[in-house]
Amino acid sequence: MELILLPLLFGIVSFFIPGRWGRISSLLFAAISLVAVTVKLFYFQPDVKEYFVNNTGTYVLGMTFNMAIDGLGILMLGLSNLVIFLVALSNFNREEASKPSFNGLLFLMQFGLNGVFAAEDGILFYMFWELTLIPVFLMLYWYGAKENHKNLLTFFLYTLFGSLFMLLAILAWGAYTPSYDYNKLMYAAVPSQYVCWIFTGFLLAFAVKIPLFPFHTWQPPTYSTAPMAGTMLLSAIMLKMALFGMIKWMIPLSYSALKFWQLPVIILGIIGILYGAVIALRENNMRKVFAFASISHLGLIAAGIMIFSFDALMGSIIQMVNHSLIAVGLFLCADIATNRFGTSDLQQMGGLAKVAPRFGFWFAVTVLIALSVPLTAGFIGEFLLIKAVFEYQAVFGILAALTLVLGAVYMIRAYQMSSMGAPKITNVADLHWNEMLVLALVAVLAVFLGLYPNGIISLVKPSIQHMLENVQDTTNLIK
Amino acid sequence: MGFSTIVYILLLLPLLGGLTNGLFGKHLPKQFSGALGTGVIFSAFLCVLMLFNHVNEPVQIDLCNILRFDSFSLEINFLIDQLSVWMSLIITGIGTLIHLFSMGYMKEDEGYYKFFTYLNLFIFAMLILVLGGNYFVLFFGWEGVGICSFLLIGFHYSDPVKGISNSLAARKAFVMNRIGDAGLIFALFMLLSTFGTLNFVDISERLSEGVSMHHLTVLGITLCLFLAATGKSAQIPLFTWLPDAMAGPTPVSALIHAATMVTAGIYLVARSNFLFELAPLTQDIVLYIGIATSLFAAFMALRQNDIKKVLAYSTVSQLGLMVVALGLGAYTVAIFHVTTHAFFKALLFLGSGSVIHGMHHEQDIRKMGGLKKVMPITHWTFLIGTLAISGFPLLSGFYSKDEIIGHLFDQNPVLYGVIMVSVLMTAIYMFRLYFLTFHGTFRGTQSTWEHVHESPWTMTLPLVILSVFSALGGLLNLPGLFFHEGAHWLSGYLHGAPGMHNIVHETPNFSTTLGLMAVASALSIGVLAWAYQNYVRRGSVAKSDEALNGWEKLSNRKLYWDEWYDWMVVKPIEWLGFQTNHTVEERGLKSGISGLGMLTGKAGNALRKLQNGYVSSYLSWMVIGMILLVVFYLLNGN
Amino acid sequence: MDAVVVIFVTGLISLFLGMYHKPMLALTSNLLGLSTAFTLFFLYGTYNSVLKSHFFSLVYDGSGVLLSLLSIVMTALVLIMGYNSQSKDRSNYADLTSLMMFSLTGALCLIGFRDFFMFFIGLEILSIPVYVLVGSRRGNQASAEAALKYFFTGSFATAILLFGIALVFGATGSFNINEIGFAILSGLYTPELMIPGALMILAALLFKVGAFPFHFWTADVYEGSSKPVLAYMSTTVKIAGLFALVQLMGLIFGNLKGNWEMVLYVVIIVTLFLGYLSAIQQKSMKRLLAYSGISNTGIALLSIMSGADHGSRNIVIFLLAYGASALVLLVVAQFAQDEENDLEELKGIGYRYPFLGIALLIALLSLSGIPPFSGFFGKLLLIQDVLVNHPVLSICAVLSSVIGAYVYIKLLLHFFHKESTLKDVRLNVASIIVITVASLLLIGGWLILYI
Amino acid sequence: MPTSTPINIDFYIILATLLFVIGAFGVMIRRNMIVLLMCIELMLNAVNLLMVAFSSYYNNADAQIFVFFIIVVAAAEATVGLSILILAYRQLRSIDISIFNKLKG
């Protein structure tokens, strides 16, 4: 429970810590929660669901406030705490870190995220889900580019639009059970013609958040006008909520909705892969390149999840973790490059690696990780995902694999245009120690997970298998 | 010391060398960095020699398991057999020499330690590639060499003049290779779902046990594997990156883009011989692609004026020859040509490097000439290399090439004729290169001439050693023509590799072999004589770009191949990218969303018009509303 | 009943206190009266018991008690808020409070009505003082115009209501809800009279709560009235009206045979969208609240689709949240000098004054239906009940919430702008109290579900 | 249905409805506010008529009591209405309702 409540406490406290101490305290707070989750992870029994709150029975509104973590939950908790730590660390030398409101929002965000990953009750899940939106929204507003009202409104309304349908879905689902408790929902006897609608509601929310083509239009402008921390939070962890939600909340429904939705969503995912990649090929705004790259990456993950097979889910989970890492790394690099050149236009950049060699090196490492070269987690993830898609439908697999090629083109292009060639600026600051630490941590973790994906797999295997077995049972029951 | 220990030491040496240089190289003296880099590779070479002495049966060394599922698992293991050891020998052996050469060549470069880091890491990746016991590990090395190649091609990325083009060349190489990699990935998927394992030994055993496979599956797998090979080994349609890759420093071209990395594709196909043998259609495709590549590349080399570009096209052409051998199922022969080619092409590249070094980074042969006086060692070694590649009798290239041609003649005399054209052109452009560089009068500026000098011993020693091997390398696989004992030693040796022993090839008969050899020798000598006549006696020089006539222009502009790709692939994709962004994203989806927003605003304004401020209108609305209520109520009420 | 009397007497006392021109005295006595009434309700009415009057047909069941308590609290907050707003000219503060007290008496009658006598009397006692209140801004043309409009439309609606009541009486021969309900259930009524009558009563109530197509008065009247009066109208008046509507539909008319669903669908769906769509371009807080109030009414009307028991329970939290948010917004709007185009002036107020900022954040998020604020739970309860039987309505509610969020979040961005042209504002005790209480209601008000 | 009544209840209903509609139209189309007030009175009186008619029809005095309520409330309403009218008259010196349309949009 401390994992959920600590960030709330930190968030509230941070609002009152004056600027001078803000940057240190935020780093400290983030480190504390990271350590807490690491310790938990260390002693965690993957095959037992650990309840923080466990109310049984029926309550007003059917809300039980139940919270629990299984293997998947603790992994996501760890990921969110890690990302928050990385965000706090990468902001350490920036002006934002000395603003109480910034730090406060950061930890409130963490509170919401941790809640989403631990919620074991439909309504509670929705509440935490929306709760994450507010801090990041305010952060984007206060610390983002000046004239971003329109983008922000689009972002907010779009995500709200999706998530309200998820709420409807949860409510409809809960109408067939005494409470919204996850276990109860899992065994709810929903008439099969409604399952598809409920599934659709969830899908809409997740599709907007991920974002899946064609629900992505809020994303590139938001990413390119957001402050670095906001972009990182959005892409590294907020959209993971949607992927996590797809796994945790859509699998129990998949037994009769899948035959209707599987193919369309996979097709949308594949289109997203190609669409994002093709746009990224020609985009000159560095942040937008990475934003479209993100769409491309996530299309693959979403398609993989929709296959709902064990291997594909494992691939998706590994790739989720990996994508968080690369998102932090890439957007940090993009921000640094943008800062140094004073523009995010790739055509006005050049030769940064020469004048800032440490940046050049770590940026290259990050790009390679993003290209999912072997030995990194991305390779394992993409390998499993493309394999799963390929086995589902060979043509899709081949299209999905174009991401390997196109990804190389736009990533290397971004690197080459920004860092290679004759330097267009001189006398710039190289990486600050905290930035280097972030990129190094990202690299180390990506390589570690690339060599030892069994760690993640053994952690989440019991919970995923449990879910899939349940679906199998239900399917048999229906037959 | 067990095999596994040796293999681990062998792999760790270049890795450690690379890491040491990478982490501390900035603070180490240059000589030390270079010596360290060279030393670890030499030690690795010694390790391989130990393996070479002991290898007998294929030995699989299991390291760990990366991913374990019920349906399949991904393991890291190494396979020590004749093929991998032989490749390792080439890699570490040539690698040592090129490292040594680099110590001199890169002396003035500020990224000295970085260069050795990359080189060592490249050797590491290449060793992983050839020693890997399954396709998964092979893929690790495969990507690893690609990355190192990228880094090394773009080594001078910040050069004020050539920086951009260097980095673009690196980008091109990486992307082209990536296309091939996608093929390899698919091969992996298909192999996994067919066999549940990726181990070479297991797959070959399953196949020899007669596991039935759908012919389309085999076709798919082999085509994907070959796609990967075309990427790495610069075959049509993915060859265009290799000439551009000459932007890298010359030792890199020698090591990566001539001797080792580009032969990874050949290695991959040879390694997968058990699969290719089951797919005759793929073999035919391989054969024709090889012939086409060999022919076109040789043609393109005819009128290149950059000393390295000539060698680059020659590499593509020679790789084509190897692919021909693969297509004929003569895997050992291909490896034989890989070996001899590694010797003479490394020699030629290093020789050209020595020339470039002496000429202060001038690469245009139109500004050279008469260098044999000032650079005697380079000249003589280069001559040996040229003779070897042109198939001059009794030198290494003569034997390996002849063997391929012999096999081809056996199968298809028409194709033999075609490939002879390529061989002829090879001799022509090589002698042209040699004579224009070393004979005649110097065509550069006077000030350059005064500074032209022979290279230091670190550079000439590798040249000498390589020239010895280039001359005598043919002994490795002498045709049965001369001896019966010890003939085809290399082929026999390589038969120990998985799957190889199942492949039986009839060697051409005595008289055919002799006849073919005679033709080849005649060609080579004839061209030599013609070239001497043309370039030395008549003193012809290379024309300037404007003076080229039709076919020369085609050759010089590489058949406009890059332009074709630009026009057919790059431009459409970029157009697509632009249109997607501009039309679909901005005009379509985004304005759709903002249109919705505008629509709500418009609707709001329209509604506000109803609110006109007159009480009577409000009252009328109330009455209308009540009537509407009644109407709706009665609509289908009772 | 005792509570209703107490409030009426308090109103009378304020009327006399008006002679002394001591606003503080009036406020104190009113708050005393309100708290007594609150206590009486609280003591005798718990959620599951029925508080019955002996003399008149006033019945307060669980939700009735809760809503009465809510109206009392809201009125108290409005009084405090009004005390603040009248700081320049408080001479008639006591008179206005007494009017509000009388109106509250009517509201309580309307909440507990069990026959059409009480219904009619309650509605009129609720409305007539408000006509006066709307016109209470001296020498203000807008105020006079608003009062005029409210009066004429209101009287018209009253006439319609009465005609409806007469017809219903004609159809059944009784004014008593239970008897009418029984008659309807057993089919002993004249449908030719009953159905027009029911529709006319419905129309009059829809007028009171401001639903399409009887909503036209709201924006104009809200704009013309002072902010406390506006607050009163959008809290107590709305609470009483909506609850009466729910009771009426749930207890009697819902059982009428006929195509009620079609009628209500049209009314609710148009109301849902119309308000927010018109609110998008507004420059004045009052008009914006008026229009957003229309859409909120639309959502509250969902409760009449889910039967009497559920409907009245579901509406409590929603009305609490809506009223509290409106109070916060209006108190903040009071800080503007310009009464009409106040929004432009208030730019950045939330960023400059974090206390106000947090309150605004909570209020606007609650209005947008973002958890964990009461507004979310209110909508949740309402939608939860209609979802399975009327999915179209719930989807429309969700879509209108998105448009609403657009309105509110734009407002939020406006308030939270980093640059502000705002003149310094002085936070006074009254507004701090109102804002704090309202924010607490927004944060924790939904917990009354668990009582 | 009691047969003692000489006139059918339907006629009362029709008469009351007619009166009500006339009043309603008057409110809708007239611009003089005094006339508006009178029209509303007319509507209320239509209701009274109806109530009394039903009262006698059902032999139920409740409706007659209701009529008294209506009369009282109508008086109160008229008072308030007239005072508002005076208030408005002071502003614009007119009792034409259509002048008062400053609040709109």
Image (tube, rainbow, N blue to C red):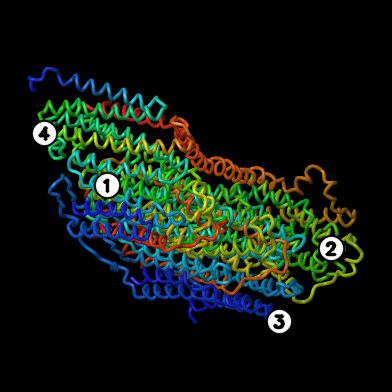
User: From this viewpoint, is residue B107 visible?
Assistant: yes
Q: Chain of mark 4?
A: C
Write the residue at 26% across / 26% down: B634
The answer to whether marks 2 and 3 mark residues whose Cβ atoms lie closer than 8 Å is no
Q: Amino acid at mark 4?
A: Ser
Which dot marks residue C107?
1
The residue singled out by tag 3 in the image is B29
**Residue C102 picture location, percent across and down:** 29, 48
Nearer the observer, B198 or B532: B198
Q: What separation in Å lies between label 2 and label 4 (alpha carbons)? A: 118 Å
User: From this viewpoint, is residue B135 visible?
Assistant: no
Whether labels 2 and 4 belong to a single chain: the reply is no
Write the residue at 23% across / 20% down: D15
- Secondary structure beneath dot 2 equals helix
Q: Residues within 10 Å of mark 2 (few under 14, many from 20)?
A: many
The answer to whether marks 2 and 1 mark residues whose Cβ atoms lie closer than 8 Å is no
Q: Earlier in the sequence, mark 2 or mark 3?
A: 3
Q: What separation in Å lies between label 3 and label 1 (alpha carbons)? A: 93 Å
Nearer the observer, B498 or C132: C132
**Residue C194 picture location, percent across and down:** 19, 29
The residue singled out by tag 4 in the image is C186
The residue singled out by tag 2 in the image is B438
Q: Earlier in the sequence, mark 4 or mark 1?
A: 1
- Secondary structure beneath dot 4 equals helix
Residue B86 higher or lower than C16, as above or below: below
Residue D95 higher or lower than A231, as above or below: above
Whether labels 2 and 1 belong to a single chain: the reply is no
Nearer the observer, B29 or B591: B591
Q: Chain of mark 3?
A: B
